[in-house]
């Protein structure tokens, strides 16, 4: 079975929660998307965003990376 990787993305901006899951074909591609999402919204990049959570899972449900800011 071909492996897939899933980026789980959650953020709260102005009290509105936005969420989504992005599917990637490789772990390297998933890591790039993971870091891009955190870089765009976490660490005070957007003053109206007060919560960001991102994680990567694989097709078996294993959590490979996870961070909540």
Image: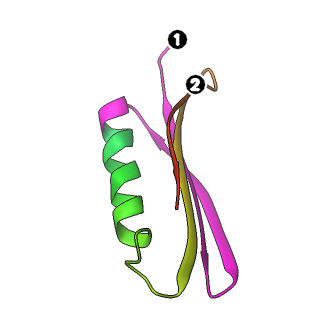
What residue does disc 1 label? 1
Q: Quadrant of residue 39?
A: bottom left
Dot 1: what SS? loop
Say the numbered circle drawn on residue 64: none
- As displayed, is residue 25 above or below residue 12? above
**Relative to 46, 54 lies left or right:** right
Which percent across, then down, holds residue 58?
53, 27
Whether residue 26 appears in this view of the structure is: no
Say above or below: 32 vs 3: below
What range of the chain is rendered magenta? 1-28
Q: Nearer the viewer, residue 9 or 24?
A: 9
What is the quadrant of residue 29 in the picture? Answer: top left
* Relative to 12, 7 lies left or right: left
Residue 14 in magenta?
yes
Q: Which of the 4 image quarters holds residue 14?
A: bottom right
The reply to whether the C-beta atoms of the residues labelled 2 and 1 are less than 8 Å apart is yes
| Image: 37 above or below 64 | below
> Residue drawn 52% across and 62% down?
69
Q: Position of residue 32 (x, y in %)?
A: 30, 47
Question: Which label belongs to residue 59?
Answer: 2
């Amino acid at each position: 079975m071909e492996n897939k990787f899933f980026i789980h993305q959650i953020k709260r901006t102005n009290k509105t929660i936005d969420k989504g899951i992005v599917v990637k074909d490789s772990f390297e591609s998933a890591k790039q998307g993971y870091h891009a999402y955190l870089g765009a919204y976490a660490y005070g990049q957007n003053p109206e965003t007060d919560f960001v959570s991102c994680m990567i899972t694989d097709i078996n449900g294993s959590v490979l990376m996870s961070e909540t800011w």
